[in-house]
Amino acid sequence: MAQTSDSHQVIIGEHEQYTINMGPQHPSTHGVLRFELSLEGETVVGVRSHCGYIHRGIEKMCEVSTYQQIIHLTDRMDYLSAHINNEAVSLCVEKALGIEVPERVKVIRTILSELTRVGSHLLWWSAFGMDMGALTTFFYGMRDREKILDIFEESCGGRLLQSFICPGGLMHDVHPNFVARIRELIPYLRKKLPEYDRLLTGNIILQERTRNIGVLSRQQAIAWGVTGPSGRGSAFSCDVRVHEPYSAYDRVKVNEVLYHQGDTFARYRVRLDEIHESLSILEQLIDQIPEGNDYAVKMKPIIKLPAGDYYQRVETARGELGVYMVSDGEKYPVRVKFRSPNFSNLFVIEQLAVGHKIADLVAISGSLDLVIPDIDR
Amino acid sequence: MNLYDFSSLTQSIHQGLSAMMAPAWVTVTEMVLVGVVFLLFYALVGLALVYIERKVCAFIQNRLGPNRVGPYGLVQTVADLIKLLFKELLMVHKADKFLFNLAPFIVIIASFLAIGALPFAKGLQALDLNVGLFYIISVTSLTVLGILLAGWSSNSKYSLLGAMRSGAQVISYELSVGMSLLTIIIFSGSMQLSVIVDSQADGWWLFKGHVPAFIAFVIFLVASTAETNRGPFDMAEAESELTAGFHTEYSGIKFAFFFLAEYMNMFLAAALAATVFLGGWQPLHFGGLEAFNRVMDFIPPLVWFFGKTFALIYIIMLFKWTFPRLRIDQLLTLEWKYLLPINLVNILVVSWVVLKGWHF
């Protein structure tokens, strides 16, 4: 493997290898990520991923932010799972303080998380189609994701970065239309999802390009800490919602979607099935929202966690997000560490793509569903 | 059928010019005239196709497409062209300057040369060579030369990868294009395009030629889509993999040349398919329906020609906007393991059919 990043050629045996930089500005890296590829013709013989191009020092910034302020930073990590990131920090703080939030808050938080998951998977499907060269998928996915963003906008004020879930509950109450909108959304998406299968899933070209490409074994997935839909495509049962239910997940039936093939197509199927699964969770929860308007418990303006360290994990759209907080009893945490799913999911690509073509590398990195700001933080 | 014969028009122009000047000058003037007409035609069709493509893909994708510049956005492509004309021509450091500048011209000349041999209507054909079909195939294959040069001279690895892909792809699919056309050459017994069109006066080869002609037609559509580097075979550009492939480093009008040439190649492929398989400018005729046939005769041949061509272009556009892209090895597998053997068998079947006189 070529060890240097400049473009000189390394001759091994009969073959000539050359290095090519994919990114940091490249259409299929979905952000500022750089793959340093060693190629023999079109075949990938080595991948080195370089991250850090969008490092903003979020963990360090957390050390000089109050716990309410941290919420706004977590939005900017995995911006497609903003609600879920907020929830992780909120749950961690509430756990430390020993606060029990109202039932209504729990249900609404779970509904928001599932909406986020559906929206994120829809965007992933759109972008994955683009990666594979099917340009129409992008507009289909975006069209349907728009409905979810409208719900967010109405209730939270923000479409992408909501900062809505905060320690103690929610920032404010949801919009009166909230329930009605979701009741409309569920049958709408149920009607549109078969369209996705007709357009892309059933396509012979897509299946040929994704089956047996980038096979991730269960052992590998566990060893590299690949979680979320990417891990579940390899039969790694890692759904936090099932194994360690938080918020309202203990009162709904969550079917963990597992596929055994571990290839790109399995990861694709997991995500599409998870949209259906999230819709059924939404369906179960939408009638369970308790009456009333208590959206938060009364919190002090400045939260001080008791000294000690606290950990909370949640399932984002991309995998397991862990929040580790160390407090010495002051208003700022001493240390905050995020275990972000994308960071673990990224580096497995160095194993998966070797021996495949460049086009497969794009498919594999698309199927891992990377959000680069979550890797760098 | 002599209702819309353009040969009288061209004859009268020729005679008028002959009356005015020496025969040598007449030839020169006619060449200039034809050149100007084709240049105008080329630009017009190119701009129209870009607009049509944007509208078609917009409707497939639940969008409106261009709708701001001019009525229904009709002037949008002209505005884009003006923008491209004024853009800076970037030159990559250590690029091969001469070849870098030459490549877009080779690509555009290759597509331009081929238009001359297309029969647009009766008597409306600049070059009626007796090897017309062969001429078009050979001239369009010059495109790959320009693409290879562009990739090589850009001094960029992405460009080179795109060019190498394109080279492998175009050279492979040229075989299928040629062989599927060969079936019709066997049917009609000539390579001359006007003869091929005339042989379809009583029915198009797609219908007259039984199953083999239909197979050849499908193969031609697939292979010519691949040869013009359009999706789902746009390996050479593959923007999600190679950013923009062979024309990554081109900007301004030089990029526009590649862009325009791609659309003209698509037009050529569709026009050739229309001419060879769908009767060119011949109207749709059914045996036994005299009244119907006579009504069809009143529709001008230019309408027939462009109607068929744009119908095929629409199909080629549908391919691009619905299918994901193939991988390079799958692309070559499709050609060498499937299309080529099917084609070879097909030619044998066609020969047998023609030998036995089973076709209509």
Image: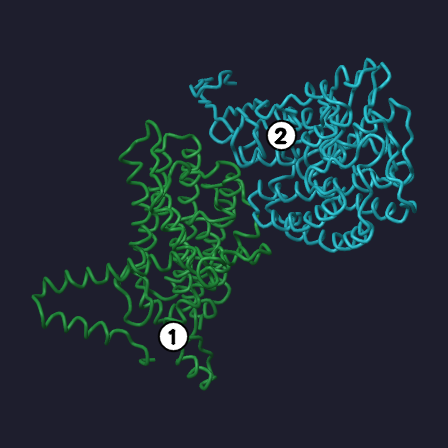
Q: Nearer the viewer, residue A178 or B151?
A: A178
**Residue A149 place in picture, x, y as percent:** 70, 46
Residue at image coords 54%, 24%: A45
A297 sits left or right of B257 in the view: right
Which chain wears green? B
Q: Is residue A159 left or right of residue B200?
A: right
Figure colour scheme:
by chain
Front residue (pair B169, A314): A314
The image shows residue B291 at horizontal and vertical percentages of 45, 86
SS class of the residue under badge 2? helix
Instruction: Give the residue type that dot 1 points to.
Output: Ala
Q: Residues within 10 Å of mark 1 (few under 14, many from 20)?
A: some
Most distant residue in the left direction: B22
Give residue A242's quadrant in the image: top right
Which quarter of the picture shows residue B23? bottom left
Q: Chain of mark 2?
A: A
Horizontal side of B292 relative to B64 (left or right) equals left
Mark 1 highlights which residue? B201
Q: Secondary structure at mark 1?
A: loop
Seen from the viewer's position, the closer of residues A56 and B143 is A56
Indicate whether B11 appears above or below A345. below
What hue does chain A carry in this figure?
cyan
Q: CA distance from mark 1 to mark 2?
A: 62 Å
Q: Is residue B183 above or below residue A111?
A: below
The residue where tag 2 is placed is A372
Give, as a three-letter code, the residue at label 2.
Ile
The picture places residue A111, in percent across and down from the top left corner, at: 82, 42
